[in-house]
Image (spheres, rainbow, N blue to C red):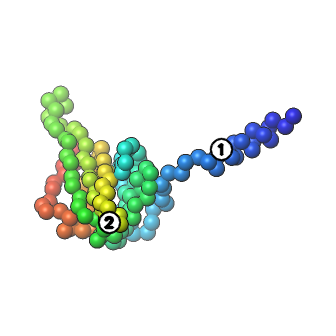
Amino acid sequence: MRLPSIALALTTIGATFSPVMANMPDSAAGSFKVEALCTISNAYATCHPQINGDRLIINFPSELVVLDKDEVKSIDLYDSRRREFIRFFKKTGDIDFAISFLEGKETRTGFIRFKNNRSARKFYNRLVEYNPALFKSSINIEVY
């Protein structure tokens, strides 16, 4: 009986039917990329949002989104950091970016969450350079 060849065929077939997640190359010339957690539907997963010239590129867990400046409607920041007595009043928490964009006639919103304030500050500064009209006032993100 040829069990090894049947097992090989089944693993090959199984590999071709595995779900494909949105992914992109590690780096592109002239782009800025950080690591974060992203979602556009219901589950957060690791992603690497990039700003490359006039394009914002986000590899959400379920899809790759490439946005020009005119497609981004708004960017809202949600800061859940707070000072904790136990940690000698150091701030703890997350910073979320809610990016609303046009897809056809529909407005969609994706979320990018940073645990590292240094990455959040760098991403915020690059977003301000990318399109300053999206922000009404500047925000100071402390690095601690």
Q: Where is residue 137 in the image (x, y as percent from the top left)?
A: 12, 61
Residue drawn at the location 43% of the way across and 58% of the way down = 64
The N terminus, quarter of image: top right
Residue drawn at the location 17% of the way across and 62% of the way down = 135
Residue for badge 1: 14
In the image, taking residue 20 as reference, residue 140 lies left or right, namely left
For badge 1, the amino acid type reads Gly
Residue lying at the far front of the rendered structure: 105
Q: Where is residue 113 in the image (x, y as percent from the top left)?
A: 30, 47
Instruction: Name the one closer to the observer, 45 or 28.
Output: 45
Residue for badge 2: 105
For label 1, the crowd category at 10 Å Cα-Cα, with few meaning under 14, some 14 to 19 and many 20 or more, is few
For badge 2, the amino acid type reads Lys
- Whether 37 is drawn above or below 75: the answer is above
For label 2, the crowd category at 10 Å Cα-Cα, with few meaning under 14, some 14 to 19 and many 20 or more, is few
Element type at marker 2? Answer: loop
Residue drawn at the location 80% of the way across and 37% of the way down = 4
